[in-house]
Amino acid sequence: MTRRPLLPLLLSFVLAGGAFARQEPQVPPNTPPPQPPAGAANGPQPGPAVKTPGPGERTTETTPAKPPARTGGHGDFLAIGPLADPAAAARGQKIFVATCAFCHGSDARGGNGGPNLVNSVLVLHDKGTGAEVGPVILHGRPAKGMPAFSLTDAQIRDVAAFLLSRSQAAANRMDYKILNIITGDPKAGEAYFSAHCSSCHSGSNDLAHIATKFEPVDLQSRFLYPKESRYPGVPGPPPDPRTEKAVIVKLPSGQSVSGKLDHIDDFSVSLTEPSGEHHSWLFEETPGIKVEVHDPLEAHATLLKQYTNADMHNVLAYLETLK
């Protein structure tokens, strides 16, 4: 048997392997990816192809439907249902005053033995329909002293509308209307003013013509709550310097610093001197510090705890004479 030399075989094998290594990989032709069939891009279900509108053409996009308009207004916001019909409530008020006011009061808030109907559960469940209050009106409640009344269905619905309007008015504070509050005695108000207010105020000096500058409601608010509060950055006139608190800080060294009180709490105090220089101290870091605060409105805060309802109306009635 003839043997072939080993070296030539190895060389031929290496050369063949190198040839294989030098072969370039096959690159597929540069063709665009296949496009989906017409309409397939619009969703999982086949449909018509999307056509780009040309110049002057309008798109065919569907406009989403608008939600239904809210009609209840404040009634929706306050969850008190649709507001009562004003005309029906006005008719029902006349019937109620003539028939029911003796026991329940002309405003349905209770009277001579009759309960308050404004917050009655029966009235709230009735919702102005007359379905709940009707049987009570027609049959009465003899065990509780309420007689029966012969009203027509239309009259019962009107009374129910009036009661609904009263309960809604009680819940809807946004529609609250302040009536005449000048009900006090001016003479009694002047006597109270002389006894408690004349040391700081005078009807012929700082309060002269005060009634021409403010409405009665605003004037009453000013002498009850004279401090005007405003959030930082909110526009408005500067605070009245007569209402600002002053403070005297006495340091352990014996030095005293005084000025307008900027802030005080359980941990620190700060003030601004008339020169504009600002100071602040931490109580923990300044043992022995003493602070004296002078509030020009302290007398108002004290009187606020002492006023009776008659006092407030009497003082307002007196101030309304300063025109």
Image (tube, rainbow, N blue to C red):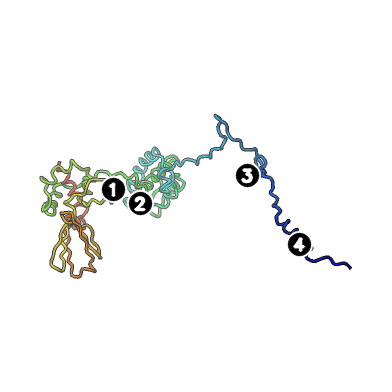
Disc 4 marks which residue? 11
Residue 43 circle label: 3
Cβ atoms under marks 4 and 3 closer than 8 Å: no
State the CA–CA distance, disc 3 to disc 1: 53 Å
Q: Is residue 306 visible?
A: no
Please tell me whether residue 63 is drawn above or below residue 192 in the rendered image: above
Q: Position of residue 305 (x, y in %)?
A: 21, 58
Q: Which one is nearer the viewer's eye here, 244 or 271?
A: 271
Q: Position of residue 124 (x, y in %)?
A: 42, 50
State the CA–CA distance, disc 4 to disc 3: 62 Å
What amino acid is at disc 4? Leu
What amino acid is at disc 3? Gly
Q: Which one is nearer the viewer's eye here, 121 or 282?
A: 282
Q: Nearer the viewer, mark 2 or mark 4?
A: 4
Q: Position of residue 41 (x, y in %)?
A: 63, 43
What amino acid is at disc 1? Val
